[in-house]
């Protein structure tokens, strides 16, 4: 990993202070490598956002029917409340949906 890469920058910041969420603009290329770097840089969630998009007002959260899925919905609900969003929808997916090929 290059010392100037976004993954390296996140790793440096994660060493200095614990963060729950990393928000990054969607890169033009190298998406897969960047995601691996960001996810391996610490114990945090990663949110990629498109450039020049309107404010978030609605969200769909697709999670497995489980305790971690419930925690994901609660996390997104808190985030949307702080953003002033109007609607949260969730879809509970059975475990087999994650393993379908």
Image (spheres, helix red, strand yellow):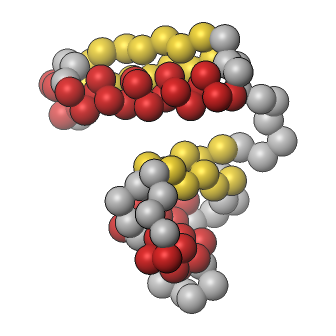
Identity of the residue drawn at 49% across and 69% down: 17
Q: Position of residue 58 (x, y in %)?
A: 63, 17
- Quadrant of residue 87 within the rendered picture: top right
Residue at position x 42%, y 14% from top?
90
The answer to whether residue 97 of the structure is visible from this angle is: no
Would you say 63 lies left or right of 41 here? left
Relative to 91, say whether 37 is above or below. Answer: below
User: Of 94 and 79, which appears nearest the observer?
Assistant: 79
Q: Residue furthest left?
A: 96
Number of numbered discs on residues: 0
Q: Quadrant of residue 36 in the image?
A: bottom left
Above or below: residue 51 compared with residue 27: above
The image quadrant that residue 91 belongs to is top left
Any part of residue 96 in sight: yes
Horizontally, is 42 left or right of 70 in the view? right
Percent across and percent down for residue 77 are: 50, 22
Location of residue 51 with respect to 1 vertically, above or below: above
Report the residue at 35% width, 59% height from top.
43
Residue under the image location 52 percent in, 27 percent down: 78
Looking at the picture, tell me which residue is in the foreground, 3 or 77: 77
The quadrant in which the C terminus is found is top left
Locate residue 37, reporting x and y percent: 44, 69
Task: Point out the residue furthest to the bottom here.
Answer: 3
Q: Which percent across, then down, holds residue 51? A: 78, 46
Residue 77 as seen in the image, left or right of residue 85: left
């Amino acid at each position: 990993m290059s010392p100037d890469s976004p993954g390296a920058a996140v790793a440096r910041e994660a060493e200095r202070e614990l963060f729950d969420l990393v928000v990054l603009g969607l890169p033009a290329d190298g998406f897969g490598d960047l995601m691996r770097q960001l996810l391996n840089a610490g114990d945090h969630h990663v949110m990629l956002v498109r450039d020049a998009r309107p404010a978030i007002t609605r969200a769909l959260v697709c999670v497995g029917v489980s305790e971690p899925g419930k925690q994901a919905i609660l996390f997104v609900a808190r985030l949307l409340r702080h953003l002033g969003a109007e609607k949260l929808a969730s879809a509970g997916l059975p475990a087999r949906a994650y393993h379908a090929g």
